[in-house]
Amino acid sequence: MNKINSKLNVLTLSCGTLLFSTFLHAEILYRDTVDPQREETVSLIKQGQVDAGLQKLRQLLILQPNNQKLIADFVVMSYESQKFTDQDIKYLSGIQSNQFPEYAKVNVLKALRDLRKFELAEQWAKKFAQTDQNQMWVVWIGVLQAEAGKTVQAKKTLAPLDINYIDPDYLAQLAYAYRILNMPVEALNAASLAVEKNPDSSSAQEQYALALMVNADYAKAEKYIQNNQILTQQPQLRTNAKISEFTQRIQNAVQYYKAATYRDRGNIAYKQLNQVIEDMAKYEPELPNDPNIKRQFYYEYIYALNERNLSREVLAQIPKIGLPIEQMPPYVRQSIADAYLKNRQSKLAEAQYKSLLKEKNYQTYEVYSGLYYALIEQEKYKQANNLLLEMDKMLPTYRYSNAKGVDRVTHDDRMEYINLVGLNYVYRHEYAKAEQYFEKLVAKAPNNVVYQSNLALVQRWREQPQRSEWTLAQWDGVEPVDSSIRINHLENMQALGDISEWRKQNAYLMEAIPGDSGVIKSKKELNDRNHASIQHQSTFSKNDSDNTAVLNRLKGSREQENLTRINTPWFFETFRAYANHSNRWANYDDGKINDQRVGVGLEWGSHRKAVNILLSQSVEGQNDRFGVEVDWSQWLNDHWQYVLGFNSQADIPLQAIKKGSEGQSYTFGLNWNHNESREAGTTYQLTDIDDGNTRQEVTAYFKQRIFAAPHNITSLILGGYYSQNDDVLVDYFNPKESYSAELTLQHDWITWRRHDRNFTQHFEAAIGTFGQKGFSSKPIYNAFYQHDWQLSRTWNLNYGIGWGTHPYDGVDEKRTYAVVGFKGNF
């Protein structure tokens, strides 16, 4: 039995040996068949039949996936032909590191690297390094890690390398790795040694030039490129060097102007930025016809122009880039968004800011505030308010230090946000809330210049420029002077009528911060004083009563009043002359009566004091009625103003003028202004008419704002009137005593607004009572509706209609009237 088993084992062994020998022989025969096909196919590829050749190699790889030379030739040929694809990665699985040809190993890494398969390339580099101790594999591993964003790992991998024992070509690679790892000194050392070891290596020369750039030695880099025959054939490299130089100069200039502005260095702050912008404009025609290089240049140019507040120039560069804005880098889009906002294209700005908030690490105050003001410019107050709530959640509250013992401090973005919350009240016409808000902030942080500056701003908007200036005065002698303090002081001088100081401050700020919107507006308003201006107002009315005798004692069945004044430009800072035309006309039963006057006058205004002197002459009628009118007004402080007036040809009733009478009037007025929401005033006038009548009149009013919103303002006015006349027989309404009291509801609805233009609808409804000696009191009613158009910054138009009823001698007069007026600068 054992003998039989022994024979069977021998037989099995013999069969197995025979089968193995057969397969081995077949494989050798097949390999001998594939290798000639491989060599022939490689030859065809080199002759230009690339696609067909590579397809043949792929077919052979399917048949023999572990053939090392076949894999190697396919990788080399496909990589050099730029035909290696993601689908070809599967052929690398047959590589055996210890048998794979040396000539193809680097191509494996390059092919995978070009496909951005950094992790896989790193794995193969580590496998090749296991069978080859050459330091080039360590360089490759470090490069791939750096390109994959593994900064810490890459630095750790490259740390043990000694550059003195690395081949020149791989020194260039190492310099590249150090450069993208933000290790400029190490990059320059490696590149310098690479050039020293192999001066003719183009890659070493290129990396040396680039290393000089990252070390900010642009002059040396540009000179090296110019003197190098190989590199001069690469105009892109030279241009990149120039663009890199511009980039660094822009960054330095921006840092300088921010520091210099803080130190109140005036126009010197922008000197460096102005120079780099000028140099870039000169270099622009020299740009090579390469879209990528041009884009990089214009990206930096746009950023620089925006930092200089040259918004129109920013927008002019966009078409030169040749890409949709959404495909540009975030920092460029932010500059474009800022330019749109400054150029009053707020809808476009809104879209760009919203896209930036979707970017990583772009949820900053600058972007949020840009979006906020873009919404405000579009009157989207509700959305702006909601954005503030989002900012509160998204913006950091504190900034922390890694140093031991250093306390946390409030983050700059949070500080800016806190200020914006207060200003948001202002934009919504909630001035009282804004003032209280900033007063609380100042109480908590009295040395915070921004809080103090915003408090002063709100105080001026509340019609208290003197108080605003007192707030700013706390910073007198403090150096440097914050720009917000200067701008507030500028606008206070304008409000206080200190023209010379206003002009002086504006000239300084137009050089120091010419892009500031407040400074620009102030400059325009200052220039308005150099232009002639005109103003006109007309009233037309139709009067009706059950007693025509009452109409004849008043202003007839129809009446009209016109006043036109044309002003010269201001001269000697505080003077201007003007021509005046006035006309009063009424239709009575016995005909029309007209009082038309023309005159010339001189106005002086300075430091909230004003004088008007008008010399006028009647135009029609038998009487030569020459008159002098003098008015004086002065604000004693933010709250109190008094007015004095004299008119030698007072506006006496037309019936008296027809009879040849003349009159003189004396006026005294006192006004009180608490703030923009509350005011009051009273006026006493005595008119001495040479028909024997002396008329004394007292008027008073109190006005209180009761509602305010971004587009609506509502006020209540309580008014009173009292008069006395001498008991003389005259043709005009002349009660011995009369009095009235009225309550008026006013509402302004800003229906449409775009920057300097707006349309406002004005509504008035009044109810009151009127009484006169000898008659019982009767009610007064009045309703008025008006359109106010701000056509531009300097021109406005208004027109309106009204209806009212008023008792005279116990009989109601019903009056329907219309008004129209305009004002503007030439």
Image (cartoon, grey):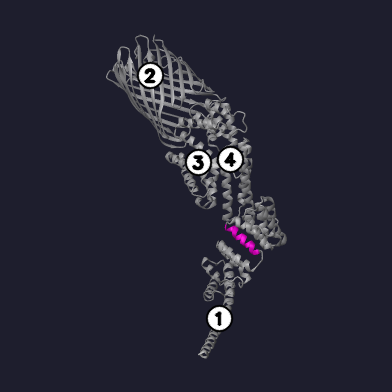
Q: Nearer the viewer, residue 653 or 369?
A: 369
Foreground tag (1 vs 3)? 1
What kind of residue is marked 2?
Gly
3D distance between C-alphas at marks 3 and 2:
48 Å
Q: Which mark is residue 407?
A: 4
Residue at image mark 1:
27
* Residue ID for mark 3: 369
Q: Can residue 378 be seen in this snapshot?
A: no
Residue type indicated by callout 3:
Ser
Taking the view exactly as shown, the residue that stands out farthest to the right is: 196
Rendered residue at 60%/28% (across/down): 476
x, y percentage for residue 444?
Answer: 53, 32
Q: Callout 1: few (<14), some (14-19), or many (20+) C-alpha neighbours within 10 Å?
A: few
In the rendered structure, which disc, 1 or 2, sits on the residue that comes first in sequence? 1
Relative image position of residue 774 (x, y in whole percent): 30, 12
Q: Please, what is the dominant secondary structure of the magenta stretch?
A: helix
How far apart in space, not on screen, are marks 4 and 1 (Cα)?
Answer: 76 Å
Identify the disc placed on residue 720: 2
Q: Secondary structure at mark 3?
A: helix
Q: Nearer the viewer, mark 2 or mark 4?
A: 4
Visible in this render: residue 305? Answer: yes
- Amino acid identity at mark 4: Asp
